[in-house]
Image (cartoon, rainbow, N blue to C red):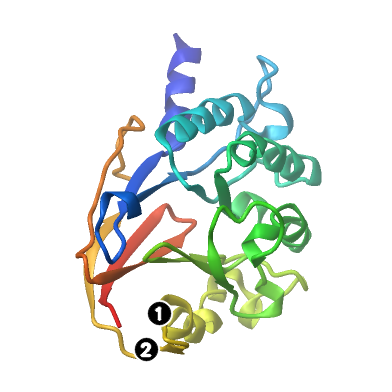
């Protein structure tokens, strides 16, 4: 029984959310869904399904649910591993292969369990799609990052009518933190988090003052089971989702060009 409760507790940490974005035309053919998961860290490999502090067995089950659900891509909001070692980082990256084979993208963020500069450098190598390169973009375009030491760590991309902004708050590839502390690491990203990151291109230019309306803010009160949930945006609007490793997603709509 104790083992069952332990497993349930960790399953609750592996949050899965299906969200629906609707393009400007709002036609059924233009709708798409994406998956969100978090905290695939694990302590003990008692049953052989959790090597290198990564919950590979559960990841495999979730991957199949995402594939069956027809999502276009999956975002992981941090804590890819428990110990952040090179072996653990590689194991987590390998566990995404089933998504790639099915044509589903995977766009992760680091969490505090892989917060080192070494992990930052390895992350860039393991997930080139976060810099807009490689074979696993899954139709995503328009990749940007705030600076070279956060290239592919903090990043934004477009899919359909939506702009996704993922914020990394940990030690950078050069081993530094802003003003000497990881507590400050979002501060110097603020200029990028504004219009350069969150505003989609309109006829080759960027609208510096989009009109926005909050759609949803999701915290740790997410559902216990991976029940699909949907949210539709107005037909003439665009959506921007800002995502952090605190398992928080905030989406807004802006009037289209």
From the image, which quarter does the C terminus lie in?
Answer: bottom left
| Residue 209 versus residue 193 in the image, above or below | below
The secondary element bearing badge 1 is classed as loop
Q: Which residue position is annotated with label 2?
A: 207
Point out which mark residue 199 bears: 1
Q: Which image quadrant for residue 226?
A: top left
| Residue 168 versus residue 207 in the image, above or below | above
The secondary element bearing badge 2 is classed as loop
**Res. 219 in view:** no
Seen from the viewer's position, the closer of residues 206 and 225 is 206
Seen from the viewer's position, the closer of residues 11 and 243 is 243
Measuring from the top left, give residue 242's x and y in whole percent: 41, 66
User: Residue at 69% of width from left, 63% of height from top?
Assistant: 133
Measuring from the top left, give residue 5's x and y in whole percent: 43, 18
Q: Is residue 216 left or right of residue 90?
A: left
Seen from the viewer's position, the closer of residues 125 and 189 is 125
Measuring from the top left, give residue 223's x and y in whole percent: 30, 36
User: Residue at 34% of width from left, 55% of height from top?
Assistant: 30
Measuring from the top left, give residue 47's x and y in whole percent: 66, 14
From the image, which quarter does the N terminus lie in?
Answer: top left
């Amino acid at each position: 029984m104790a083992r069952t409760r332990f497993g349930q507790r960790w399953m609750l940490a592996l949050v899965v959310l299906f969200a629906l974005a609707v393009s400007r035309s709002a036609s059924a053919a233009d709708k798409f869904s994406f998956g969100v998961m978090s905290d695939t860290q694990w302590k003990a490999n008692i049953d052989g399904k959790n090597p290198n502090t990564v919950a590979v067995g559960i990841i495999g089950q979730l991957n199949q649910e995402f594939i069956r659900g027809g999502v276009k891509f999956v975002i992981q909001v941090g804590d890819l591993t428990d110990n952040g070692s090179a072996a653990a980082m590689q194991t987590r990256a390998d566990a995404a292969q089933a998504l790639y084979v099915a044509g589903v993208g995977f766009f992760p963020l680091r969490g505090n369990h892989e917060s080192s500069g070494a992990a930052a450098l390895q992350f860039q190598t393991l997930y080139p799609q976060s810099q807009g390169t490689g074979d696993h973009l899954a139709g995503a375009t328009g990749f940007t990052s705030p600076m070279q030491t956060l290239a592919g760590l903090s990043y934004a991309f477009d899919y359909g009518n939506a702009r996704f902004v993922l914020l990394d708050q940990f030690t950078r590839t050069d081993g530094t933190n802003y003003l000497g502390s990881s507590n400050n690491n979002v501060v110097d990203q603020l200029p990028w988090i504004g219009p350069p990151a969150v505003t989609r291109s309109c006829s080759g230019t960027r609208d510096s003052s989009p009109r926005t309306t909050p759609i949803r803010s999701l915290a740790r009160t997410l559902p216990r089971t991976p029940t699909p949930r949907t949210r539709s945006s107005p037909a003439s609007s665009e959506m921007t989702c800002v995502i952090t490793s605190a398992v928080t997603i905030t989406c807004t709509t802006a009037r289209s060009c």
